[in-house]
Structures are given as C-alpha cells and as structure tokens.
Amino acid sequence: MTVTLNIFVMPKLQKYMKKIRRYKEKLKELIIRIGISYPIELELIDETLTKLILPCHLGIMFFGDFDVSFFKKISINLNQIFDSFFFDIRNLGSFNFSIKQFYKGVKKEFRELKKTSTKIKIHPTNKFYQILINRRREENLGMILAITDLPIFSSTNNNILFLFGEANLKHRCCIVSSLILKEVFYNRQANRVLVEKRIIKEIIHEVGHLVLGPDHCDNLSCVMRFSKNIEEIDQKKKELCKKCKIKLNKIKDDFNF
Ligand SMILES: [Zn+2]
Ligand SMILES: [Zn+2]
C-alpha cells in the first residue's frame, strides 16, 4: 500500500517542492529589489600604490557638517596617542558629494530602532575611499582619514549594517561615521560632548589599524578593542593598553625613529 502511494505521490511532491523553491527565489529577488538592495561594486583604483613608510603625514577630510573646532581636538588626541608617528596632521577641509555621486552605491534600509516606514540611505565605504586615495596621492600623504555624518556600510563585509568606522590597510585610508554614535539616533537627548568622545575613540581605533594592523585587542578598556555597540565604545578608554603600546614601540623601532 505504502509503495503504491509513494510511486504516485513522490513525483507530484517533487514537482511541488520545485515550484516552492522557484517561488522562494522569486521572493528573495523581490526582497532584494525593495529592501536590502545589492550595492553596485565600486572597485578602488590606486595606480601608484606604495607601502607605508613611517613617520608620515596624515590628512583629515570632513564629509558633512562638523564644528570647525573639532579638527583641533582630533589632532591633539591623535598626537597624544601616536606621538612621533606623524610629521603633521593636516586639515583637508570639507567635501560634499554631487547629487549623482551621493546616490552612487547607496543601500536603502529601514531604521532598525524606529518603527517608521521611511528608509535610511547608507553609503558604501569604497565611495569615500576612492576620494581619499586620490587626495592622499595629490597631497603626498602617508595616510588619510575621513569623518562623515552619513551612515556607512562596508564595501567588503556584507554582515555588518551601519558601521562606526572602517580602515583599508592596503590603501592606507580609513573612515568614521558619526551618525550612529549620536544620542539622537537612539531617540535620546543630544549630547555633543559624549558624541565627540565616541568619534575620537573611533578615529584613534581606525588610525590605530593603519599603524598597528588589522588585529583587535582583547583588553576591555583598550581603544583597539572591537565595539559592537555604543555601550562598548563608552566602556573603553581613548587610550592604548600596555600590550598595544609595546606593539606601537616595536613599529617605531622597526622604522628606526
Ligand atoms: Zn577595528
Ligand atoms: Zn590593547
């Protein structure tokens, strides 16, 4: 009895399974189209890519609206941590995207914390990196950093939506986004001092990658610890731990300065 049933039922079942799988694929395509859209690939062009030589010149660019006094605070903090690693830290001023550039590679996502139907435009890191690479070469800098108030996602890691920051070691550039470091993003009262502290920690962290390499530190209070959320950023200090300081001094010795 069972055997007979199987002979007749199995092919039908397989047909249905095939149909369901086809619908699943179609649904996936639809979700991609309306929601989590695949960004266009933005390949980085860096024709005269050379290895980092230390000490070097560091440039900082601003994408968006930042207080003019902020640069000074950033450079004081970077000099405190990295000391003789930089000949100088240069303010390269602010940069704005043209409308066409602004939409390039943008991913639209629902804001996770606010139950609203409006989507937020997130920008791929490679879009910033290409501008940074060109500017780094023009200005003859060893490394370059961008700070933006736009939300960013990684061009190379699809798993993290909304980045605090990212460093591209090969191209010697890094970026920090202030948007999700802001209290207002979490529907809390604005707190400029706290947000500036978080941005500075993330800047030190990303520049730290350019100097120390891709590894994260497991010391809870070290600035080189990876932070999943703003609470973890608040927990860590804006300083390197003993272990990371030793690593920094070793690099200094290797480059003979
Ligand atoms: Zn990191
Ligand atoms: Zn450390």
Image (cartoon, rainbow, N blue to C red):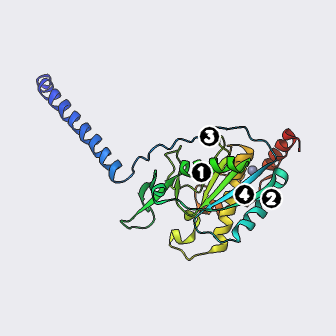
Q: Earlier in the sequence, mark 2 or mark 1?
A: 2
Q: CA–CA distance between discs 2 and 3? A: 28 Å
Give the structural element (helix, strand or loop) at label 3.
loop
Measured as percent of width and height from the top left, residue 5 is found at: 12, 27
* Three-letter amino acid code at the position of disc 3: Asp
Q: Quadrant of the C terminus?
A: top right
Q: Quadrant of residue 100?
A: bottom left
* Three-letter amino acid code at the position of disc 1: Ile
Q: Is there a contact, CB below 8 Å, between mark 2 and mark 1?
A: no
Q: Which residue: 73% across, 48% down? A: 140
Q: In front: 116, or 225?
A: 116
Q: Which residue is mark 3?
A: 46
Q: CA–CA distance between discs 1 and 4? A: 33 Å
Labelled disc at residue 131: 1
Measured as percent of width and height from the top left, residue 136 is found at: 68, 49
Number of the front mark, 1 or 4: 1
Q: Is residue 41 left or right of residue 221?
A: left
Q: Is residue 152 above or below residue 183?
A: above
Q: Which residue is mark 2?
A: 79
* Three-letter amino acid code at the position of disc 4: Ser
Q: Earlier in the sequence, mark 2 or mark 3?
A: 3
Tell me if mark 3 has few (under 14), some (14-19) or many (20+) residues whose alpha carbon lies within 10 angstroms of its own: few
Give the structural element (helix, strand or loop) at label 1.
helix
Labelled disc at residue 221: 4
Q: In front: 137, or 87?
A: 137
**Residue 137 appearing in the image:** yes
Q: Is there a contact, CB below 8 Å, between mark 4 and mark 2?
A: no
Q: Earlier in the sequence, mark 4 or mark 2?
A: 2
> Is the CB of mark 3 within 8 Å of ligand 1?
no
* Three-letter amino acid code at the position of disc 2: Asn
